[in-house]
Image: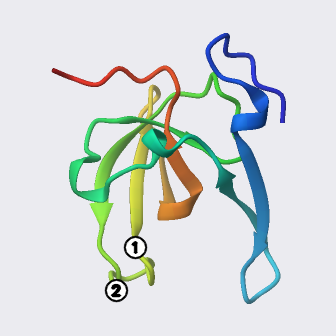
Amino acid sequence: MTLRLNHARRKNYITEEKELKNGIPYLVWKKYPKNKKLDPENALGVRVWIAGESPSSTWTVKEHRKPGTVGFKDGGFVLIDKFSNLTYVEYDEVIIHPSHKDKK
């Protein structure tokens, strides 16, 4: 994966491929700066970066799904993009986007 962000160094962001029980592969974040870990309790409205996606893609956390919720055995997030498309991801598939600014 090639990053096109001036403030993000490629060696600081590494993904790893995992596989579901049915054989479908997916990517998770293996290495990233510690301050980019997404806290499920304070995630609403935060711009995130999905493993395997382009850094220019824009996804925002819409909902937090707790572990045990139908479809979310280990918990996860519902994300929305600028076109109102939804996607569902597990905790380890997303981090805070490098360009996200914390609200004060």
Most distant residue in the top direction: 6
Residue at which label 1 appears? 75
Amino acid beneath label 1: Gly
Chain-order first, disc 2 or disc 1: 2
Q: Nearer the viewer, residue 86 or 91?
A: 91
Q: Residues within 10 Å of mark 2 (few under 14, many from 20)?
A: few
Say if mark 2 contacts mark 1, CB within 8 Å: yes
Give the residue at x 42% y 47%. 79
Observer able to see residue 90: no
Q: Could you say which quadrant of the image residue 21 lies in?
A: bottom right
Where residue 98 appears, as percent x and y from the top left, is 53, 26
Where residue 33 appears, as percent x and y from the top left, is 56, 40
Q: Quadrant of the N terminus?
A: top right
Relative placement, left or right, of 80 versus 27 is left
Vertical order, 10 against 4 (above or below): below
Give the residue at x 22% y 57%. 41
Secondary structure of the residue carrying numbered label 1: loop
Q: Could you say which quadrant of the image residue 52 lies in?
A: top right
Where residue 88 appears, as percent x and y from the top left, is 49, 59
Give the residue at x 32% y 53%. 39
Where residue 6 appears, as percent x and y from the top left, is 67, 10
Relative placement, left or right, of 48 versus 50 is left
Residue at which label 2 appears? 68
Secondary structure of the residue carrying numbered label 2: loop
Relative placement, left or right, of 103 versus 59 is left
Relative placement, left or right, of 40 versus 4 is left
Amino acid beneath label 2: Gly
Q: Residues within 10 Å of mark 1 (few under 14, many from 20)?
A: some
Observer able to see residue 93: yes
The span from disc 2 to disc 1 (Cα, nearest Å) is 7 Å
